[in-house]
Amino acid sequence: MSRGKASIRDVVITTEAPLGSVAQIDYEGMALAQRVIKYRGKENILLNDFLKQSLMSHYFQKLIHAESTGSTVKGIKGSRLHKQLLLIPDLREQEAIATIILQQESIIANEQQFLDKEKEIKQGLMQDLLTGKKEVTPNPEDFKRE
């Protein structure tokens, strides 16, 4: 199991069911099982944050799906996955790209949280209206024809 032991910031990708899901390890002590492959960027060559984004990219996902086999469940062998090529810019560019993407992901996560909260409020209000806890007072202006 030592081969499967992951460290913080390592990047993992699933090889089947579902194919190509990518994550980055954020805590110690995680052991990996079948159908998950761990990658770690080489120091001073490839940043793990950039590696994660590269594996999640439309470009890379198309590559691995083209190399996958199976009809009911698509999968890719580790030996084929390891042969896929990544475009690797210099470290400064990797850092800049990864930083911008992480910032955008944070904004999206915050907006999703806000949306989820608004949906919860709406659902509660609808429930109150449908059960009669809150009375609906129609506004005559809403029914005027133009």
Image (cartoon, rainbow, N blue to C red):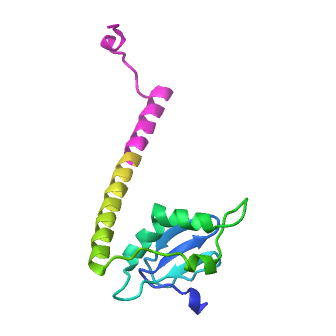
Q: Is residue 118 left or right of residue 75?
A: left
Task: Determine the image quadrant of residue 69.
Answer: bottom right
- For the N terminus, which image quadrant? bottom right
Tell me which residue sits at (38%, 77%) in the image.
88
**123 in magenta:** yes
**12 in magenta:** no
Give percent across and percent down for residue 131. 50, 28
Tell me which residue sits at (62%, 68%) in the image.
67
Whether residue 19 can be seen here? no
Tell me which residue sits at (27%, 71%) in the image.
96
Tell me where the magenta segment starts and ends, as one range: 117-146
Give percent across and percent down for residue 25. 46, 77
Between 116 and 132, the one lying in front of the other is 116
Above or below residue 91? Residue 111 is above
Q: Is residue 77 left or right of residue 118?
A: right
Please, which residue is most extreme toward the top here? 145
Between 56 and 134, the one lying in front of the other is 56
Between 24 and 93, the one lying in front of the other is 93
Whether residue 129 can be seen here? yes
Task: Determine the image quadrant of residue 107.
Answer: bottom left
Give percent across and percent down for residue 85. 49, 75
Above or below residue 31? Residue 53 is above
Q: Is residue 12 left or right of residue 17?
A: left
Tell me which residue sits at (34%, 51%) in the image.
111
Helix, strand or loop: magenta stretch: helix
